[in-house]
Image: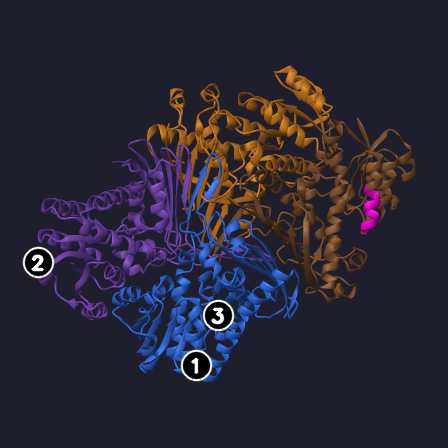
Chain colours: A brown, B orange, C purple, D blue
Amino acid sequence: MIEVALFGAGRIGSIHAANLVRQPGVRLKYVADVNRAAAVELAVKHRAEVRTADAIFAEEAITAIVIASSTDTHADLVQRGAAAGKAIFCEKPLDLDLVRARTCAQAVGKAGVVCMIGFQRRFDPTFAALKARLAAGEIGEPEMLVVTSRDPGAPSIEYLGTSGGIFKDMLIHDFDIFRWILDDEALTLFATGSCLTDPAIASVGDIDSTAVTIRTRRGRIAQINTSRRAAYGYDQRFEVLGSKGMLQAGNHKPTEVFAHNAVNVSQDKPEHFFLERYRDAYANEMAHFFDALANGKPLQTTIHDGVKALELADAATHSWRERRAIEL
Amino acid sequence: MIEVALFGAGRIGSIHAANLVRQPGVRLKYVADVNRAAAVELAVKHRAEVRTADAIFAEEAITAIVIASSTDTHADLVQRGAAAGKAIFCEKPLDLDLVRARTCAQAVGKAGVVCMIGFQRRFDPTFAALKARLAAGEIGEPEMLVVTSRDPGAPSIEYLGTSGGIFKDMLIHDFDIFRWILDDEALTLFATGSCLTDPAIASVGDIDSTAVTIRTRRGRIAQINTSRRAAYGYDQRFEVLGSKGMLQAGNHKPTEVFAHNAVNVSQDKPEHFFLERYRDAYANEMAHFFDALANGKPLQTTIHDGVKALELADAATHSWRERRAIEL
Amino acid sequence: MIEVALFGAGRIGSIHAANLVRQPGVRLKYVADVNRAAAVELAVKHRAEVRTADAIFAEEAITAIVIASSTDTHADLVQRGAAAGKAIFCEKPLDLDLVRARTCAQAVGKAGVVCMIGFQRRFDPTFAALKARLAAGEIGEPEMLVVTSRDPGAPSIEYLGTSGGIFKDMLIHDFDIFRWILDDEALTLFATGSCLTDPAIASVGDIDSTAVTIRTRRGRIAQINTSRRAAYGYDQRFEVLGSKGMLQAGNHKPTEVFAHNAVNVSQDKPEHFFLERYRDAYANEMAHFFDALANGKPLQTTIHDGVKALELADAATHSWRERRAIEL
Amino acid sequence: MIEVALFGAGRIGSIHAANLVRQPGVRLKYVADVNRAAAVELAVKHRAEVRTADAIFAEEAITAIVIASSTDTHADLVQRGAAAGKAIFCEKPLDLDLVRARTCAQAVGKAGVVCMIGFQRRFDPTFAALKARLAAGEIGEPEMLVVTSRDPGAPSIEYLGTSGGIFKDMLIHDFDIFRWILDDEALTLFATGSCLTDPAIASVGDIDSTAVTIRTRRGRIAQINTSRRAAYGYDQRFEVLGSKGMLQAGNHKPTEVFAHNAVNVSQDKPEHFFLERYRDAYANEMAHFFDALANGKPLQTTIHDGVKALELADAATHSWRERRAIEL
């Protein structure tokens, strides 16, 4: 039995809790949150108890922690978890500061613990199937990747002001998709963007529409386009051109109803947002984490992936601000 | 707390068990099965106990029963459940014999208990969304229904020999879809069919490919085509032509990966079979049953629907054998 | 140089004229029509001359005739053309009367002339590609055919009153598709239908919505559903289930624009009607006719096909009126 | 009657010839080509005559010229045509040298003649419908454009050596699409690329895979990705994100056949190459040119568009070579 403590009883913490209690041989023992009421509610729901971080790190029976608290707490919790010898699952991003993230990764490396970063998209059924087919050689050598990543709407301006900017907050996932799908690292990166959907976003120094181009060590090319607002919902697509063909990952939709009328032929718009689209992905990543722990299998994402994605987000932020291509 | 007894610990019984234990305010208390080992295993899994039918019907605390045992036991269990005042969920078909099914329905009526028949397709997200849009008038008055219903492969010949024939075993669902979608009753029915996929099916007096045409009281028209074998998997589609347009229910597929190569552009074939395609439908129907019980809401399918679908299956069998249209 | 006379300068005659003048080695020499003004206009447009039928049949230089005049003139013109030794292209239907159609076919047979019936759908790029792939064995043995055939709207009641009824006027094409695709003949046929879109149609003894089921000599099954009105345009689809898979022929649409908005994801509805959808088919059938004439190739449709389709339309009319299955 | 001279009797010249002779009130009078045999063949086909450029420019009856000769002759012919007061249709690109193209445009401006550049994609039914819907405000304000433009295979290395490079030879069309769709001009442009499909392409100093990002004066963003090789054929798509939704232009395919089998569900790959995909576009642009001439309507593309697209191609070439973003 793997006994687990969960940090963070908010929206994403609740999702992780519900998924982890379904894993065979896994028990949610403790929940910690600065919002004690939220911690209690979630703990009660899953027959767990509320504990402080100190108590959690001190208890040897806890062999794994799941970090779903606010971003500014991630690095500290990862380092404490590493020091205490816990297996760690940490939500993205590791940290908004690249230096601190690297320090964190060193601590994890020294401690010799495992640390999975919650890049859940790798566990989406469509994305994972595409990756498997690409790896099996179905379209030969990959040459070009085009990623479209658009949210249905922007978060609050308050949140945006502390988010680290769109590249670290939103594109961090797309940078991970890029590294994972092309199995390659960036050599040159160019980013640009605009504030087109809401001037309030510009007022906190951020943008809402971006375009990033990456050329890799092997000469492969990736383009990422993102927006904080797509009127039609959550748009999560990518396509890979290879020497023998192309693989595309399309959006998921709620039903397969098609309507014909005097105007047009229509179908459902994509699932609304990440909680709907990535419901399976969140379940799959938690299953993967505990399966890897229980059976000594390698993790599909590690703290290294967290650092590398942040490096790209950092470079993109510089590129956008300085209006120049960045060599990595 | 609604305390429930489950009859049948086979494949479909296990699915119902897993779904019902997730309902708030519902507890699986007993499992009964002629195969005691299966009953024990399922009971242990869900912290229930094994009991005989006699014990179950005698226990007042049990207010609802779920019947997922073999078809030949359905009518008897429904009648005993009705006599004991239990709320009943019964898998389709109610019985292979129309007279017996009607007797059963009378017993339920007299006892004043609720009895839902497991026509799970009505709870499929795609089918339910189509029905709701149709009911909202999106395509005006319905005029024509075309149902395509094909299995990936036939069951064993042993099973087929006791199945009651393709119309009662397989099309029973399609007849229910017909009644539900058009909200109308059959006036004339013509059925024909052939044995095209395996001569062994003919050897037990059955066919594997059928075509049924129904004209309703309001003059609406329905066509149903079925096959025991579709090389590409489980094909579950229908479309309704209305005065203002058409609504189609398409197949579900495992992923949204699209592949382009030198030959063609392809996507996943449909989900393999009913366990995959109707996973959500099975969960939704169980949620509906217990929600209706708990909150005094009307059931979306009743024993009447079970009888009416069987009437159509019976008429279709006669039409096919006698090569003539049947007036209902 | 093949010199041709065209009977009929109406809508379909104009289409045939425009297509035939583009064939290499073919010259439109004469146009005949009871509406002399129409004949003159069409003749002038293509540098042809207006002639009477008598003059045309008397002129030996005319080796081929294209009959696109009103249905009631077809049989007579075919017989006169046969007697005069002309190669004949005749629009469908050959005649509304089965006996007369058979007499016509005998005359053609005796005269030893070729006579192609204008079942243009066989020459539609989508339908022809499907047929070729089926013939190449891509889905094994065909087992079941489902044909959906719906017009955007009904013709005038005046026309309907002389049309011979929906089975001869509209389904004649679908019956030909059935024979062509399954390469088989009907054994049993059941037809039903209703008047659902306009009571005026019933007032001339006709219906607007039909369902036909055919079982063939080899036990194959076909279902045809038709309507005089589809709010979304011309719906021309069919699908063939075979032992190894399924081939579907979908509708054509004007453009490949897809729109995503806050309501749904939509695309163009199908091309409006037969003039748009079968533009290529009309061109291809004319090319085929003259290519066959010039190079001594066999015609893909003959007067025999015209008779057989009419037999099915006749049987369907009887089946519908007499509410019984017809053995052929 | 507009009398026309055509320069260039090659592949594209033949297409223009076939399209222009179909325009009412237009007559192809002369054909000129350095390959006299080709000129004669094309002239004979359309009942035109072969003439030298000198003779053509000297003949007043010729009021319009169509330039479809090799790229290096365009500028000279445009300037001579302008000097002679002819209306000009010129294939893209105007010239490979930006200075010369601008000189050319000045000459045209001074002469006051019309000069349409053959950006035929604007006349593609799908692209034109999308543009019209965008202009009608269907998706609000455009924010982002993603263009995918891939050829089925590269031209000969000999050709590539004189092509001016991929940005001028291939992306010139995509740059025009960008300007036309967003109705905006570039402010910043970044281009990168690789030679991934054939080292011979690198040997002539060119690349085969490119990614271009443009930020416009209004802050809109465009991404273009291209490849000289797509195993699945000619890939010509773009999509526009707007404040109220998205419009996508998809590929065209030869037929609407869909196949289901034990492996997948497939449809036709896109039409092979530009001659197939843009058949209608070539016809439409010629119709537009002569309609504009005959009826004094404004041309939808002018020599200004030719210069602007070349400016972007030039900037992209610099950006790629110098690995930096270019301010325009």
Q: Residues within 10 Å of mark 2 (few under 14, many from 20)?
A: few
Q: Quadrant of residue D139?
A: bottom right
Q: Which residues are magenta?
A: A97-105
Disc 2 and disc 3: Cα gap in Å? 59 Å
Comparing labels 2 and 3, the label whose residue is closer to the camera: 3
Secondary structure under tag 2 reads: loop
What is the spatial separation of the Cα atoms under label 2 and label 1, in whole angstroms? 55 Å
Residue in the image at 66% along x and 62% along y: D324
**Residue A237, magenta (yes or no):** no
Secondary structure of the magenta portion, mostly?
helix
Q: Residues within 10 Å of mark 1 (few under 14, many from 20)?
A: some
Q: Nearer the viewer, residue B19 or A224?
A: A224
Q: Which mark is residue D95?
A: 3
Residue B316 is situated, as x and y percent measured from the top left of the image, at 40, 32
Task: Tell me, yes or no, whether dots 2 and 3 are on the same chain.
Answer: no
Judging from the image, mark 3 belongs to the subunit labelled D
Q: What residue is pinned by disc 1? A: D113
**Relative to the observer, which residue lies in front, A297 or B281?**
A297
